Image (cartoon, grey):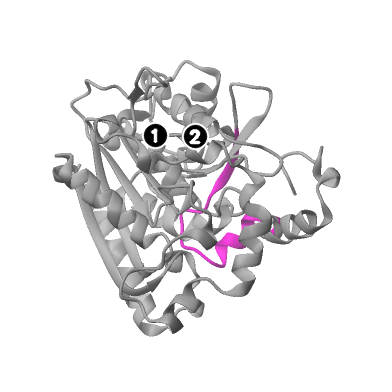
Amino acid sequence: MFPEMKGIWQLPFEVLWRFLLVRLDRLVPIHALRLTSNPPYPIKLRIPSRSKHKITVHLFVPDGIKLEKEGPLPVHIDFHGGGFFMGSCTEQAPFCSMIAASLNRIVISVDYRLGPLHRFPAAIEDAEDVVSAVLQPSSQGGSKLRHKVLKQMLRRPQPGIDTSKYTDILDPTRLSLSGFSSGGNIALNLALNIESDELKWPSLLSLTSPHPIPTLLFYPSFDQSCLPHERPPPRHLPLHKQTEIMTPGRLRLAKHLSSAYLSDEQRFHIRASPGSADIDCIHPGARLFLVLPELDTLAAISEQWVEKVEKGGRGNVLEVRRCPGMKHGWTQYPDIALKKEEKAEKVKVFVEALRFLEKF
């Protein structure tokens, strides 16, 4: 059920039972996704990391790929949300299969490490290690990834194909990213290059490459220095709408688990709060599509970041999609749980996200 069990039973009881509760979605078998999403369906792969653990990813390979016609395929890497203490690749399956099928891209959904078993910067390190596997064909992770993709492509016979001539079936120069909530925090991290005197944390992505890096940021958590119950409500929002955003139950959950991944001191680290980074740190190739639902405690902070980007002269790399009346996380809810207008807005936003990726 968990990446590792060591240390779980040492957690305080008020944290332990909540931790176990929010991990229940990991009991869902991967084959059950055939009932909740469209093909291509994910296959699991464990990629070596910089340490001893392996990173589980869900791999989506488009159906009907013809190696002779397609050549090396672009890659899209996705990161789920959950505040760095919950969430999983399972909830991302419908979105990831849509990207793979609509754009003919290999999609990788990353099951990065979470608190309280793992602390900052574990999630970012896992994300970087998966990116490294995409960028480095000869590495252990890169070789394993490509072997799995090729095997999945050839599950249906392609007569006359000489696989030996395909030195790389992935095109690492055509890489795109997406992240939802805390996953958006990770995606933005990957689109930063920090080379200040205080912190050296360079981007893995080439700063001189002519190829853009389209990045979808769905209601991302830019600033971890503010706990959920400390965030200002969206401006001009009636009181009854404010209580819809953060219910007492959500507040209690956030209070007990918000410190599961980050200590109070770490919340101010640039990599924990990437929205606090100087605008010059945004990767020169980054092209950002930002989705901002109105009924979200992250909305006010996100709008401040948008203003910062525009004043910093990088507004040309940012496209903002504001969604009136929508809640945080609504795009990942099952359609059956959405109101008619929410479902319609979800479809519109996803169509616009696909068009954004297609431009690059």
Q: Which mark is residue 108?
A: none
For numbered disc 2, what is the local secondary structure?
Answer: helix
Q: Quadrant of residue 241?
A: bottom left
Furthest residue in direction right, as rendered? 9
**Observer-nearest residue: 344 or 268?**
268
Residue 360 relative to residue 89: left or right? left
In the displayed structure, 160 sits above or below 62; it is: above
Residue at 36 percent across and 68 percent down: it is: 234
Provide residue 3's location: percent of width, then percent of height. 71, 40
Q: Quadrant of residue 33?
A: bottom right
In the displayed structure, 69 sits above or below 17; it is: above
What amino acid is found at the position of numbered circle 1 in the picture? Leu
Residue 337 shows up from this direction: yes
Q: Which mark is residue 127?
A: 2
Label 2 close to label 1 by CB (< 8 Å)? yes
Among the two numbered marks 2 and 1 on one chain, the one whose residue lies closer to the N terminus: 2
Quadrant placement of the C terminus: top left
Residue 349 relative to residue 92: left or right? left
Badge 1 local density, few (<14 within 10 Å), some, or many (20+)? many
- Magenta span has 104? no
Q: Which residues are magenta?
A: 27-46
In the displayed structure, 324 sits above or below 184; it is: below
Provide residue 335's location: percent of width, then percent of height. 46, 75
